[in-house]
Image (cartoon, grey):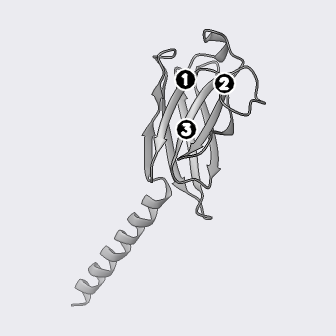
Amino acid sequence: MRLRSMLSAMRYVLALVLLLSAAGYAKKYPLTPATIVPGATGELNTGTDKNGNTEVKVKVKHLAKPEGLTPAKQVYMVWLQPTGGPPENAGLLKVNSGLEGTFETTTPHKGFDLIITGEDDTSVKTPSGPEVLRASVRP
């Protein structure tokens, strides 16, 4: 009898651990490349931080340097566009010599589009350059 109750308690703890770990980084979204960067690939991972904000982690591969776009650009910018709202500048995506890059941020939004564009500088207030990658996050 004691063994049964121990097994039952262990199952409960295991189920609780799995549930809590799934809340951390439960969602993965592929980044869809635009036709101007057909070889680019990427993934967006989302999770929830201790304050209930959405953690955003982006990894890209095979993304040409922005100078290699036509027309050439200087930087890649990451935008978060909340459902029903305007795009917000989330920051700069740097691409290394291996054509790989990572980007991390947090946002209070639960549903949004993540858009990566080529831009002439980092001070842009709205996307103006070509879109290179995109993903949609829906709660």
Q: 101 and 7: which one is in front? A: 101
* Above or below for 89 versus 3: above
Screen quadrant of the C terminus:
bottom left
Screen quadrant of the N terminus:
bottom left
Which of the marked residues, 2 or 3, is nearer the chain's N terminus?
3
Circle 1: residue type: Val
Q: Are marks 3 and 1 in contact (CB under 8 Å)?
A: no
Residue placed furthest toward the front:
84
Task: Pinpoint residue 7: horizontal percent, then vertical percent.
Answer: 27, 79
Q: Are marks 2 and 3 in contact (CB under 8 Å)?
A: no
Residue placed furthest toward the right:
123
Residue drawn 52% across the image and 28% down it: 133
Residue drawn 34% across the image and 70% down it: 15
Which of the marked residues, 3 or 1, is nearer the chain's N terminus?
3
Q: To which residue does mark 2 refer?
A: 128
Task: Pinpoint residue 81: horizontal percent, then vertical percent.
Answer: 58, 41
* Above or below for 85 versus 101: below
Circle 2: residue type: Ser
Task: Pinpoint residue 106: horizontal percent, then vertical percent.
Answer: 63, 50
Image position of 13 (left or right of 74): left
Residue placed furthest toward the bottom:
1
* Above or below for 47 versus 104: below
Residue 11 occupies which quadrant of the picture?
bottom left
Residue 85 occupies which quadrant of the picture?
top right
Circle 3: residue type: Leu
Which mark is drawn over residue 132? 1
Q: To which residue does mark 3 refer?
A: 114
Q: Secondary structure at mark 2?
A: loop
Q: Spatial distance from mark 3 to mark 1, Cα to Cα?
A: 11 Å
The 10 Å Cα crowd at callout 2, few under 14, some 14 to 19, many 20 or more, is few
